[in-house]
Image: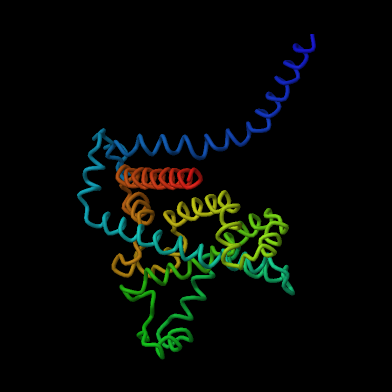
Amino acid sequence: MKKRRWTLSRRKEIATAYLFLLPFIITWVVWSVLPLIQSLNMSLYDFSFIHPEQTKFIGIGNYKKLFANGDFWIAVRHTIQFVVITVPVTLAVSLPIAGLLNSKIRARTLFRTAYYMPNVISSIAVATVFMYLFVQGGICTRVLHFFGFPDVTWFTDVKLALPFVMMIYIWQVSGFYIVIYLSGLQTISPDLTEAAKIDGADHIQIFFRITIPLLKPTLFFGMTYSIISAFQVFDQIVAVSQNKLGSPAGATSTMVTYFYANAFQYYDMGYGCAAAIVLFILIMFVSVVQKKLMNDGEGV
């Protein structure tokens, strides 16, 4: 009888849990799973908003066209450059600041708020301020000119436009990762670091032998989210682009801007969906590899 009561009670708990999860599951299916399936389906068709009556099934024709297009590979290269540079730089900026904000300093709450503020400000507003600072003759360009940098408008220069977008992106998102890493640091007991200091460990040894190992789950989440976000950068590029998305001369084009332009500016929805599916596969591949490396590191 007790076993039966326990079973009924357990079933009620499980049913209640699923009931609370149901809104999230429905939202996830409607806004993530179904659009993904629809995008995959549309990528197999020659479909245009302008002439929907001419829609026809072409199989992997869009993918063949995509991989044969030089502009697509330029967008891929820019995307990889963006991820490879912004992800480690964001980590290098946010983790030390999180460590500093975790220590006992004056006005700690004020600094925490100040560092997070850029993350809640509109990307358009942030980009506009940076554009005023890095225009030819602007404050920052004049200062950098003393160190050998050219006094030019960064966002219209083919060589400097992408680094300019990276700079805006890093400045804007770092506050979010500071909060993430700070929350992880606060779960580490101060007794561990105090015991290590008593045993003669210095700050560097404590950081690499105590802090980093205990912070691995938080670091994994932060790095994964950072990689996915960097792959999907869009707002900052839209704000910086003057005439055409990805300008000047495609110097800031990424995989997201590429499929967006083809789908919603050139109205080639099937081709744009094919580019989006390739981006999705690339993000999933990188995430799986990162997860495997993380698991292998824990097993060592």
Residue 16 at x, y percent in the picture: 71, 27
In the image, residue 2 above or below residue 104: above
Residue depicted at 66% across the width and 61% down the height: 196
The answer to which of 124 and 92 lies nearer the viewer is 92
Looking at this rendering, what residue extends furthest in the top direction? 1
Residue 204 at x, y percent in the picture: 57, 67
| Res 177 quadrant in image | bottom right
Residue depicted at 68% across the width and 24% down the height: 14
The answer to which of 237 and 178 lies nearer the viewer is 178
Looking at this rendering, what residue extends furthest in the left direction? 68
Residue 245 at x, y percent in the picture: 36, 62
Looking at this rendering, what residue extends furthest in the bottom direction? 146
Residue 117 shows in the view:
no
| Res 2 quadrant in image | top right
The answer to which of 225 and 161 lies nearer the viewer is 225
| Res 158 quadrant in image | bottom left
Q: Tag count in the figure?
A: 0
In the image, residue 249 above or below residue 182: below
Q: Relative to residue 198, is residue 74 drawn left or right? A: left
The answer to which of 296 and 102 lies nearer the viewer is 296
Residue 186 shows in the view:
yes
Residue 160 at x, y percent in the picture: 35, 74
Residue depicted at 37% across the width and 53% down the height: 260
Asked which colour scheme the image uses, the reply is: rainbow
Q: Relative to residue 29, is residue 192 drawn left or right? A: right
In the rendered image, the quadrant that contains the N terminus is top right
